[in-house]
Image (cartoon, rainbow, N blue to C red):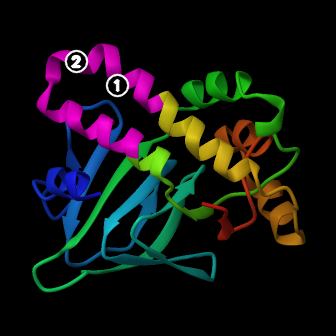
Amino acid sequence: MDALRAIAMSAGDTWTATGLPRVAMVRAEACSNQVYGPMLHLVLQGSKSLSIGGQVVHIEAPGYFVVPVALPALGQVTAQSGTAPYLAVSLALDPAIIAAMLADLPAAGKVPHGADVGVAQAGPDLIDAWLRMMQLVARPDDVAMMAPLIEREILFRMAICCARSRTPTAACRRCAARSTGFANTWRSRCALPPWRRWPG
């Protein structure tokens, strides 16, 4: 995590482009209310409280959340300390890439039903994939070849994590009914009840 944090320390106090497709990073002391597009958001340092639809979740580093559809949210970030600001990276989710990756998942990684948002602690494999992705910032000649491969691995690690939870709830079904577009593809395999904590 230290190497990831060192890279993210070069970010601005709003989402900062990295030169990598769909990947951004942030170093912040505050968090504005916003509409979150489909994304995977990994907290590297500090913590974040997020409220969507009246439900609130607190995410500590190295935790992450996944939003498969655009949703308005209220957010608040907390620095780890006065000299250790909130740090995070994000990956905007591309429906075509998700659909192709899901089609190749083994049967054990496919679940029958789901909903909108999930949260989990990032395991070492996911953190390692993110580190290799962010190291490409300093190797722009490698981006075209390597970034798509690592993006697919990040999505695979996340999908396998969410597939470990297989018990839909009434809340899950209500959220699934509201979901459209990209969420129809996503939820058929691996989305979960709102703020369901996935096994890390």
Q: Specify whether residue 136 is painted magenta.
A: yes
Report the residue marked by disc 1: 147
Distance from Cα at disc 2 to Cα at disc 1? 8 Å
Q: Amino acid at mark 1?
A: Ala
Residue nearest the viewer, comparing 128 with 183: 128
Q: Quadrant of residue 47?
A: bottom left
Q: Residue furthest bottom?
A: 82
Mark found first going from the N terminus, 2 or 1: 2
Q: Identify the residue at image location x=65%, y=70%.
A: 195
For mark 1, give the secondary structure: helix
Q: Which residues make up the magenta segment? A: 128-151
Q: Nearer the viewer, residue 86 or 126?
A: 126
Residue at 75% x, 48% y: name it: 163
- Kindly identify the amino acid type of the residue bearing the numbered disc 2: Asp
Residue 7 visible in rendering:
yes
Q: Tell me the residue that label 2 is attached to.
A: 142
Residue 59: where, in percent of width, then height? 47, 74
Residue 8, x across and y down, in percent: 19, 54
Q: Quadrant of residue 44?
A: bottom left
Q: Mark number for residue 48?
A: none
Question: Percent x, y for residue 121?
Answer: 53, 64
For residue 121, above or below residue 132? below
